[in-house]
């Protein structure tokens, strides 16, 4: 429950920040002078707002799984799955992929293809690394049905991997669109959406990694010590 409440509080803070940027908190009846033109209050593109809402829904799903993970460990103590060192390399690949797509969305000309290719290759490398981690854990006796912690690990990381695969499909569509048109306006918007999606998946993965390392239980214990 603490994980879900923390996630909802974060969403509320982000929503409040976004609303403040839209001028919805202003009081025009108390202001003097000429009214501000509508052009000074830009609204985000619908497709970008839709992607952000989708990421919020995905984040809520992982927040519920994380809350179940923490509560289950708290009620029925079990040994966490020992994560191989490869997980840090995979995290670096996902971070590099997110940064590459961010740069690709802001670059122009031939460099766009280079950064987009780097983001795609590193994302594929992340997926290959995840499969290697699953194989290593299975060989070490942490199969899907061997331990409750292992079952949660495969469920959470597998669901995250499915969202990565969905992002790779979107990247493939972006590559197809780049091959069909040389207009910069048709390139930057879809690349920017992919970058936003990748940023969200990176944040989710970092939170999942902290959860799988046992930091979620330490956070819960700290909250309890504050409330009691």
Image (cartoon, helix red, strand yellow):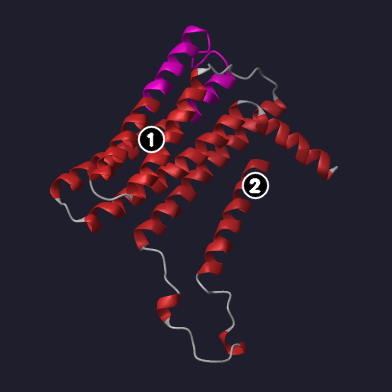
- Residue at image position (52%, 63%) is 18
Q: Nearer the viewer, residue 114 or 204?
A: 114
**Which secondary structure, mark 1?**
helix
Residue 146 belongs to magenta span: yes
For the stretch drawn in magenta, the main secondary structure is helix
Residue at position x 43%, y 23% in the image: 130
- In which image quadrant can residue 201 be found? top left
Q: Which mark is residue 139?
A: none
Which class describes the residues within 10 Å of circle 2: few (<14), some (14-19), or many (20+)?
A: few
The residue where tag 2 is placed is: 6
Tag 1 residue: 164
Q: Where residue 94 sits: x, y (%)?
A: 43, 33
SS at badge 2: helix
Quadrant location of the N terminus? top right
Snapshot quadrant of residue 80: top right
Q: Residue furthest bottom?
A: 33
> Picture coordinates of residue 175 (x, y %)?
22, 42
For marks 2 and 1 on the same chain, the one whose residue lies earlier in the sequence = 2
Residue 118 horizontal side relative to residue 141, left or right = left
Residue 16 in view in this figure = yes
- What's the CA distance linking mark 2 and mark 1? 24 Å
Q: Position of residue 50 (x, y in %)?
A: 39, 56
Residue at x-position 56% and y-position 68%? 20
Q: Which residue is found at the position 39% from the left and 46% from the top?
A: 102
Q: Nearer the viewer, residue 33 or 163?
A: 33
Give percent across and percent down for residue 52. 44, 53
In the rendered image, the vertical position of residue 118 relative to residue 20, given as above or below: above
Range of residues picked out in magenta: 127-156
């Amino acid at each position: 429950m603490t994980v879900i409440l923390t996630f909802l509080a974060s969403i509320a803070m982000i929503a409040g920040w976004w609303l403040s940027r839209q001028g919805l908190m202003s009081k025009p009846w108390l202001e003097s002078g000429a009214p501000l033109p509508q052009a000074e209050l830009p609204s985000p593109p619908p497709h970008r707002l839709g992607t952000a809402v989708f990421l919020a829904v995905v984040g809520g799903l992982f927040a519920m799984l994380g809350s179940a993970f923490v509560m289950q460990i708290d009620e029925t103590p079990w040994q966490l799955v020992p994560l191989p060192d490869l997980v840090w390399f995979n995290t670096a690949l996902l971070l590099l992929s997110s940064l590459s797509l961010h740069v690709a969305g802001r670059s122009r000309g031939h460099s766009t293809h280079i950064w987009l290719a780097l983001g795609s290759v590193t994302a594929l490398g992340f997926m290959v690394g995840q499969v290697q981690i699953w194989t290593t854990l299975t060989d070490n006796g942490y199969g899907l049905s061997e331990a409750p912690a292992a079952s949660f690990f495969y469920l959470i990381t597998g669901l995250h991997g499915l969202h990565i695969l969905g992002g790779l499909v979107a990247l493939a569509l972006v590559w197809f669109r780049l091959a069909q048109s040389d207009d910069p306006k048709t390139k930057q918007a879809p690349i920017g959406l992919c970058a936003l999606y990748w940023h969200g998946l990176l944040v989710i993965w970092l939170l999942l990694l902290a959860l799988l390392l046992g930091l979620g239980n330490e956070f819960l214990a700290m909250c309890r010590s504050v409330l009691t």
